């Protein structure tokens, strides 16, 4: 009788784990495009936030349809500075200088990340 309860518990736990993982995979991601005002360079920022772990992957287009990962940015409390407009982008000859607010609790504290682009 006890073994049946443990087996049922394991199956229910596996079912909920599978459903949580499926929801994670099926959740649509948000992406943002940045374009250099001086030349044709651009970057694609893809939101990889999960629960309170905020994260963004930065891609550079090489030749259609190939995008290459060139960097990543981490934020706190699932904050999305790109959606909120809490970022600054400065294009240089070497790449992209990003300043962004990484935590909505500290809206005046910017972090700086340099992304090297071709």
Image (cartoon, rainbow, N blue to C red):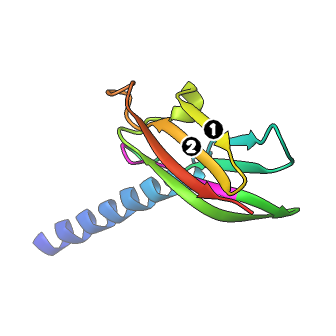
In percent of the image, x 58 and y 33: which residue is there? 88
Q: To which quarter of the image does residue 110 belong?
A: top left
Instruction: Give the Cα separation between the discs numbered 2 and 1.
Output: 5 Å
| Span shown in magenta | 52-59
In percent of the image, x 18 and y 69: which residue is there? 6
In percent of the image, x 81 and y 37: which residue is there? 37
The percent coordinates of residue 45 (x first, y second) are: 64, 48
Q: Residue furthest front?
A: 93
Q: Is there a contact, CB below 8 Å, between mark 2 and mark 1?
A: yes
Q: Is residue 8 left or right of residue 69?
A: left
In percent of the image, x 59 and y 46: which residue is there? 97
Q: Secondary structure at mark 1?
A: strand
On residue 89, the disc is 1
| Res 39 seen here | yes
- For the residue carrying disc 1, how many other residues have a C-alpha within 10 Å: few (<14), some (14-19), or many (20+)? some
How would you classify the magenta stretch by its main secondary structure? strand
Q: Quadrant of the C terminus?
A: bottom right
Q: Secondary structure at mark 2?
A: strand
On residue 98, the disc is 2
Q: Is residue 100 left or right of residue 64?
A: left
Image height check: is 90 above or below 105?
below
As rendered, which of 90 and 47 lies closer to the eye?
Answer: 90
Q: Is residue 90 left or right of residue 14?
A: right
């Amino acid at each position: 009788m006890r073994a049946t309860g443990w087996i049922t518990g394991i199956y229910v736990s596996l079912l909920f784990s599978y459903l949580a993982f499926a929801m994670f995979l099926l959740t649509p991601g948000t992406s943002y495009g940045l374009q250099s005002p001086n030349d044709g360079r651009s970057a694609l920022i893809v939101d990889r936030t999960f629960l309170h772990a905020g994260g963004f992957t930065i891609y550079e287009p090489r030749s259609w349809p190939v995008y290459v990962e060139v960097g990543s940015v981490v934020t706190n409390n699932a904050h999305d500075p790109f959606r909120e407009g809490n970022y600054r982008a400065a294009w240089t000859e070497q790449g992209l200088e990003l300043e962004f607010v990484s935590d909505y609790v500290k809206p005046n504290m910017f972090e700086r990340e340099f992304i090297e682009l071709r």
